[in-house]
Amino acid sequence: MKYIIKYSPDAKEKLIAVNKQITDIAGNVVANKKVSTIVETINGLKINPQKGQSVAVLLNIITPYRFLHVEHNYIFYKINDNVIEIVDIYNEREDFMWKLFGIKLRTEESKDYWGE
């Protein structure tokens, strides 16, 4: 089966934000390299859409989402027939499980450490 990749508006915005954030810190060359790595990894799902970890199996909750961890970011996606929808992208410092599922994984200690 041939799969196509579609990005949600949120995922597109996050990819642009990742590029801008890295550009501000490390410059355009580094940002382009890191964003290219993210996009290439996502495109690899066309060949192996099951590559990412199942959130349902990991957390024992009912959800169609899977995720990949690339360049300090979690890419959440779901598979619908031959479409792989990139739902959202979160930096590993974000409390993405709370934002997506209402599950708290962050401790006060980690919040203090990261300043968030």
Image (cartoon, grey):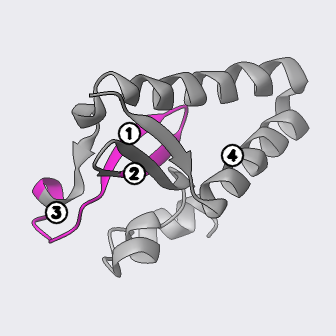
Marks 2 and 1 in Cβ contact (< 8 Å): yes
- The residue that disc 3 covers is 59
Q: Is residue 51 left or right of residue 84?
A: left
Q: For label 3, count other residues whose C-alpha is less than 10 Å away and answer few (under 14), some (14-19) or many (20+).
A: few
**Residue 49 magenta-highlighted:** no
Between label 2 and label 3, give the one nearer the viewer.
2
Secondary structure under the numbered disc 4 in the rendered image: helix
Q: Residue at x 39, y 51 (%)?
A: 77
96 vs 76, nearest the viewer:
76
Cα distance in 3D space between marks 2 and 3 = 16 Å
Q: For label 2, count other residues whose C-alpha is less than 10 Å away and answer few (under 14), some (14-19) or many (20+).
A: many
- The residue that disc 1 covers is 68
- The residue that disc 2 covers is 77
Name which of mark 4 and mark 3 comes first in the sequence.
4
Marks 2 and 3 in Cβ contact (< 8 Å): no
Cα distance in 3D space between marks 3 and 1 = 15 Å
